[in-house]
Amino acid sequence: MNTFLYAYNEHSQSAKALAQAMGIKRIKHRNSKFAGRADQTVINWGGSQLPIRNYRANIINDPKSVGICSNKLELFKYLEDQECDDLIPEWTTNIDTAKLWAIGWPNYNVVERHVLNGHSGQGIRIVDNPEDIQDAPLYVKYIPKRDEFRVHMVGGQIIDIQQKKKRLDFEGEVNYNIRNHAGGFIYARENIEVPKCVKYVAQAVHETFENDTLDIAAMDIIYNSYLNRAYLLEINTAPGLEGQTVQLYADALRELIDV
């Protein structure tokens, strides 16, 4: 088999599990013997930059697209340039604009994004008082959400959809604004209802990357039932994988690469 996997984080357990499920080798970050040939394929797991030798092979998940997705501000700028503002929440880099949002009627919450390439809610601060707003590289107008989904896509096809649901055994303070593991939420795929607009947003966002080749994308999308609209929050090109999701990715990537 001429397929290999390169992970931006060489200690990624998801990359290890995926490589094992596909029966392929991972490319080492140090002392690698991988030279790269035109008849080889490299699955790029979240790398915005790859070792030069990897570019000699066919790359699944273009580093350029990965670079756009890995930075929340760059992703929003990109989608704005593609005239896809309706697929994302309103955003700004101007603190004065963010303060105006916070004094609107009814009061709007402002999401400060202090870490542009974080995950699991890293660097997020939600503010409802204009006097409390701090300097941040990105501000997003908070949109109340009924549900939050993770839409997994490989090769432009939706292969799995999970919904963030409250853990039944969670005993801490549940955070419905930032729905991560620490706030009492897990990903579930059983007994969920996915609004059509969630799938539409995922597919519409992916189509904007047609020329840049976004082959692997786990999109976090929220759903506002009052407006019956969905909004993309972020894209992960090296999502956490476990259980059934590992096999779904392995099968989809085999089909994409035709191995």
Image: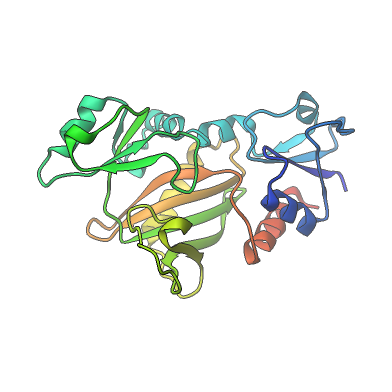
Res. 211 in view: no
In this view of the protein, which residue sits in the foreground, 223 or 257? 223
Give the answer, above or below, for where 203 lies relative to 96.
below
* Residue sitting farthest toward the left: 105
Colour scheme shown: rainbow
Q: Is residue 119 left or right of residue 22?
A: left
In this view of the protein, which residue sits in the foreground, 67 or 158? 67
In this view of the protein, which residue sits in the foreground, 206 or 92? 92
The residue at 40%/29% (across/down) is 77
Q: Is residue 43 left or right of residue 28?
A: left
Give the answer, above or below, for where 18 lies relative to 112.
below
Give the answer, above or below, for where 80 lies relative to 124.
above
Res. 251 in view: yes
The residue at 20%/43% (across/down) is 128
The residue at 64%/61% (across/down) is 242
How far across and down, in percent of the image, does residue 190 sit? 50, 73
The image quadrant that residue 66 belongs to is: top right
How far across and down, in percent of the image, does residue 27 sit? 80, 39
How far across and down, in percent of the image, does residue 11 sit? 71, 44
How far across and down, in percent of the image, does residue 25 sit? 83, 47
Q: Count numbered badges in the picture.
A: 0
The residue at 63%/56% (across/down) is 241
The image quadrant that residue 61 belongs to is: top right
* Residue sitting farthest toward the front: 172
In this view of the protein, which residue sits in the foreground, 93 or 82? 93
Q: Is residue 167 left or right of residue 212?
A: left
